[in-house]
Image (spheres, rainbow, N blue to C red):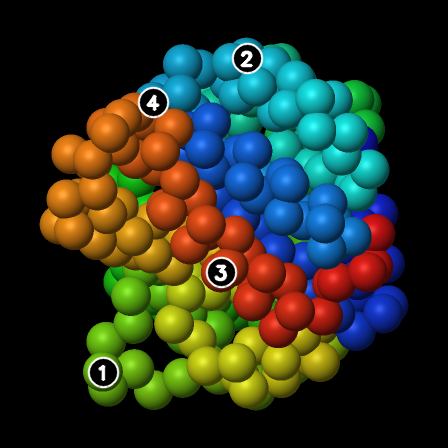
Amino acid sequence: MLVSAKEMLIKAHKGGYGVAQININNLEWTKTVLQTVNDLKSPVILGVSEGAAKYMGGYKTVVALVKALDEFYNVTVPVAIHLDHGTYKGSFEALEAGFTSIMFDGSHYDFEENLAKTKEVVAACHLKGVSVEAEVGSIGGEEDGVIGMGEFADPEECRIISETGIDFLAAGIGNIHGSYPAKWPGLNFEVLKNVQDVTDGKPLVLHGGTGIPAEQVKKAISLGVSKINVNTDLQLVFAAATRKYIEEGKDLVGKGFDPRKLLAPGCDAIKKVVTDKVEMFGSKNKA
């Protein structure tokens, strides 16, 4: 059931739980995530970076793939196809292709330009019933070649950009993309609380969900975070399971080289992590 992310996140915000954004990279990722959340009766947001969309054959291919799999597996839970860290140009291209949710990441512009471009994206998306995420304060780490050193969001900037009509907001609170360093100081909950206070209870987004301790994630949810992005975790376990399969020589037994068999352990590993995250975020049986 393909929908915008707006209603599922409003419901999550009111219900005190979080919805996972699981980034997809190929057929295996997409079918595994859809089957898993359907079994768990959890809503889901399928995140697609511009790099992943290009790898998968373009935005239209992504939409066609998700729609076909959603129908084939008789998925009954709410599913959003969400552009992750979209450029200004990419936001309009994904919208035209049929994405149901768009993140325009203007955090690398000066604030006034970020604000102006966000307004344009909101106007275009809302005409089609598509939800919009914006970002204030760059998230640390690297995402598809976009490098952010990480900074705390300015609550006043969050208030102003929230008034553009965006549906949810990503605000930097010390989180980073990718694996976290050993001396990472943790999330800044004071900044998070201040951002929630000035954005009239708008659902907030936690990028870089991989490696944040469960207790910090749950506290962030209690303070207004309704969407948590997960990507690196899945890539790591998929790679490890595939490596183990090959190192054990299973690809050399019978038709173990068949990609359907070769990639199956990786898919099983993804299923386990998605299940763990859905249970941690509290969205199981919330569809």
Pinpoint residue 22: horizontal percent, then vertical percent: 53, 48
Query: What is the three-letter code of the residue carrying label 4?
Result: Tyr
The CA distance from mark 2 to mark 4 is 12 Å
Q: Which residue is denoted by mark 3 in the rendering?
A: 273
Q: Residue at x 51, y 59 (%)?
A: 272
- Labels 4 and 1: the sequence-earlier one: 4
- Crowding at dot 1, Cα within 10 Å, few <14 / some 14-19 / many 20+, comes out as few
Q: Are marks 4 and 1 in contact (CB under 8 Å)?
A: no
Against 109, residue 212 (above or below) is below
Pinpoint residue 130: horizontal percent, then vertical percent: 74, 31
Residue at disc 1, secondary structure: loop
The quarter of the picture where residue 120 lies is top right
Label disc, if present, on residue 182 of the rendered structure: 1
The CA distance from mark 3 to mark 1 is 22 Å
Q: Are marks 3 and 1 in contact (CB under 8 Å)?
A: no
Against 5, residue 199 (above or below) is below
Query: What is the three-letter code of the residue carrying label 1?
Result: Ala
Pinpoint residue 204: horizontal percent, then vertical percent: 65, 63
- Crowding at dot 2, Cα within 10 Å, few <14 / some 14-19 / many 20+, comes out as some
